Image (cartoon, grey):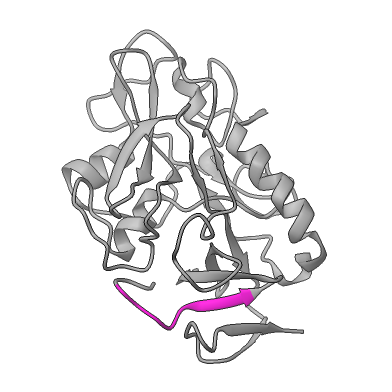
Amino acid sequence: YFRGAVTNNYVKFAGHYWRIIRINGDGSIRLIYNGKNTEITPPGTQLDISDFNSNYDRSEYVGYMYTEEEQHGNTTNSDIKTVVDEWYNKYLINYADYISKEAGFCGDREMADGSLWSSIESSHNYVAYERLVDNKTPILKCSNSSDLYTVNDSSKGNKGLNNPIGLITADEVVMAGGVYGQTNTKYYLYIGQEYWTMSPYDFDSDGWNDMFIVNLDGKVTSDWSEAPYGVRPVINLASDVTLSGTGTASDPYIVEG
């Protein structure tokens, strides 16, 4: 995985620029959207502004997909998933052969130690809070297959996606150099603008659900799901694609047919 102020992880694909996050276990290449050029000047590094979910007063609304009164349900799209799918269908649908259908996107809804899940009756922390706020121990594995968002013909995960596209996890942001509660403008995921991850943070005592975000200063923090933040989709290039270039801003990797 790439960490810090790296300058050799640029990719140009489907007429847009991306940054490589990491190489997945199956050899596919995980990318995050970086705009229509290689500058970090906002708002060009994100495709839109959206709430994560305008429904915010039930615990299940932290899901990229959710089902009311279920911790791990996947029957209803979040608002941000709708935005991401519409963008995919407009710009990436013709490049589907280059995108992995196996690598998924983890929206981990497991509970932190000492927390019990409830839809509306109690506050609780999600396990990413325990990992990243309390213990500073990010992981890349998804502990529950119902929270691994994959397309319907994948061999793993919840098979709930129509399109092989999602969002970055807070764990991936931390592995890239982000730290909970600390400013950092010296890593490649800093863009000078706030944007969503797909990792749940907590369901608080006021009855609002909160998600991890990256803020204006590159800080990993959180806010409630109805807030308006940037959308930076994530895709996985198939492991058999051929890349040319050196990966710099002036000579980005180009996906060849």
Residues in magenta, as a range: 5-12
Q: 74 left or right of 225?
A: right
Q: Tell me what residue is drawn at x 75 percent, y 59 percent.
A: 91
Note whether residue 29 is visible: no
Q: Residue furthest top?
A: 121
For the view shown, which residue lies furthest in the bottom direction? 245
Q: Position of residue 168 (x, y in %)?
A: 47, 53
- The image quarter containing residue 185 is bottom left
Q: What is the x, y in percent for residue 110? A: 39, 34
**In the rendering, at what x and y percent does residue 163 appear?**
72, 51
Image spot of residue 172 (x, y percent): 38, 58
Residue 117 falls in which quadrant of the image? top left
Q: Is residue 8 magenta?
A: yes
Observer-nearest of 146 and 29: 29
Q: Residue at x 52, y 30 (%)?
A: 72
32 versus 126 height, above or below: below
Is 164 located above or below residue 120 in the figure? below
The front one of 89 and 190 is 190
Q: Is residue 63 left or right of residue 194?
A: right
In the image, residue 168 sits, relative to residue 123, either above or below, namely below
Q: Quadrant of the N terminus?
A: bottom left
Assign the magenta stretch its main secondary structure: loop
The one nearer the camera, 120 or 40, is 40
Residue at 27% over, 24% down: 115
